[in-house]
């Protein structure tokens, strides 16, 4: 399944890489609401959550459906500013109908990207929104009612909420990450200018590719959908959004891609394509290869040593080792005329702690 973004006729200068303070704040708020998605940021998130004033924490819960499961489109600007204030000013310029639709679309609409509901002017749409919101619980139901009844008041409330987040913790966080985000955006922009779009996309994520006709960007996602970048395409780098790759593709909105920044050295490995993950899982699913993994986790072995240990033929062991090696799970080195095979533990660890513990048991 995939999401495609049509770019036929789109000039390269309309493809923009830039950091957004609002998008990064939304990523942090999502991580605070769903810490299990972001185990690598556990320490930092715990510190932010512990320092939140009680009243601010309570207000964040009221609006968390805007960022909990994913990010509402209004939080991912296609023309990001240098400061949170600038991003919020852009948000304020949206008309009420657009703002309400986007705020409710993630959890109070029957399908992202389908016909745009108009709950402010259509009583049927309004009742459908209220019914879906009530199914999400009393807090979201109350928030949706306020949004439908008095959009300007809710918009002012939300702006104040985000400004209070800036004062409580985000100003300090932004000072720490903005240089890294800006550097990543400049790097991708240089790749686009010097090597072309395909190279720039490859640097963004292995889940994003350019089709053979170079007319569509294809993103591996859980849904089949399509949109067009008629007026432009914006890429927003994120530190706290890792590992999520989010694409704004609703009708009437300029597409925006919110992607995790490139890693620094070996601090964090790059995200893998679904095909690579599937190949690795298939490789370790075979019982013989699982036994070989348990042996190779303890140290390097030759094909002959493995064949003797498991009473297998050398060609049979070689075939299994070839599968594991093709999946990227083995490290090899030569000792004279022998090749030593060893399990690449950092790579295997990314398949999951349960699997790692089972091969090291």
Image (cartoon, rainbow, N blue to C red):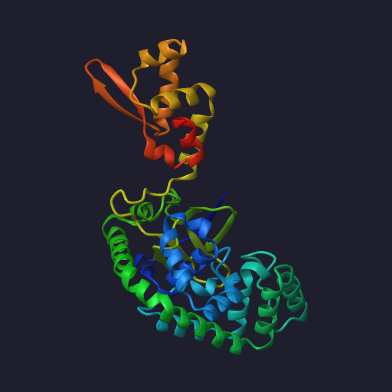
Residue 233 in percent (x, y) is at 43, 67
Answer yes or no: is residue 77 visible: yes
Specify the quadrant of the image occupied by residue 215. Answer: bottom left
Specify the quadrant of the image occupied by residue 226. Answer: bottom right
Left or right: residue 192 compared with residue 76: left
Residue 308 in percent (x, y) is at 41, 10
Residue 201 in percent (x, y) is at 38, 55
Looking at the image, which residue is at 51% across and 39% down? 354
Q: How many marks?
A: 0
Q: Is residue 173 above or below residue 352?
A: below
Taking depth in this image into account, of 293 and 69 the one nearest to the observer is 293
Left or right: residue 150 compared with residue 348: right
Answer yes or no: is residue 102 visible: no
Q: Is residue 304 above or below residue 222?
A: above
Q: Is residue 309 above or below residue 234?
A: above
Q: Is residue 37 above or below residue 119?
A: above
Taking depth in this image into account, of 218 and 177 the one nearest to the observer is 177
Taking depth in this image into account, of 193 and 271 the one nearest to the observer is 271
Residue 211 in percent (x, y) is at 45, 50
Question: Quick one: which residue is furthest to the left in this view?
Answer: 336
């Amino acid at each position: 399944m995939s999401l495609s973004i049509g770019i036929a006729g789109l000039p390269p200068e309309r493809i923009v890489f830039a950091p957004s303070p609002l998008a990064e704040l939304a990523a942090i708020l999502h991580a605070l609401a769903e810490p299990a998605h972001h185990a690598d940021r556990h320490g930092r998130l715990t510190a932010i959550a512990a320092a939140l004033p009680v009243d601010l924490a309570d207000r964040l819960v009221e609006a968390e459906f805007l960022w909990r499961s994913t990010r509402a489109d209004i939080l991912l600007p296609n023309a990001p500013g240098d400061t949170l204030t600038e991003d919020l000013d852009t948000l304020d310029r949206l008309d009420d109908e657009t703002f309400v639709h986007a705020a409710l679309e993630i959890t109070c609409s029957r399908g992202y990207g389908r016909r745009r509901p108009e709950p402010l002017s259509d009583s049927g749409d309004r009742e459908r929104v209220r019914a879906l919101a009530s199914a999400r619980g009393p807090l979201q139901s109350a928030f949706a009612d306020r949004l439908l009844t008095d959009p300007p008041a809710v918009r002012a409330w939300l702006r104040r909420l985000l400004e209070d987040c800036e004062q409580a913790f985000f100003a300090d966080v932004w000072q720490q990450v903005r240089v890294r985000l800006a550097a990543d955006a400049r790097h991708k922009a240089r790749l686009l200018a010097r090597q072309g779009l395909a190279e720039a996309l490859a640097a963004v994520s292995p889940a994003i590719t350019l089709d053979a006709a170079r007319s569509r960007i294809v993103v591996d996602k859980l849904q089949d959908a399509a949109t067009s970048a008629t007026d432009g395409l914006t890429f927003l780098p994120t530190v706290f959004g890792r590992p999520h790759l989010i694409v704004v593709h609703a009708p009437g909105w300029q597409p925006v891609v919110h992607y995790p920044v490139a890693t620094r050295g070996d601090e964090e490995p790059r995200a893998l394509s679904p095909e690579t993950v599937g190949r690795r899982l298939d490789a370790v699913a075979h019982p013989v290869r699982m036994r070989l993994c348990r042996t190779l986790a303890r140290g390097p072995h030759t094909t002959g040593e493995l064949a003797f240990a498991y009473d297998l033929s050398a060609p049979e062991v070689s075939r299994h080792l070839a599968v594991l090696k093709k999946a990227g799970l083995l490290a090899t080195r030569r000792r004279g005329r022998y090749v030593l095979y060893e399990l690449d533990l950092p790579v295997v660890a990314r398949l999951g702690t349960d699997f790692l513990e089972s091969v090291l048991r």
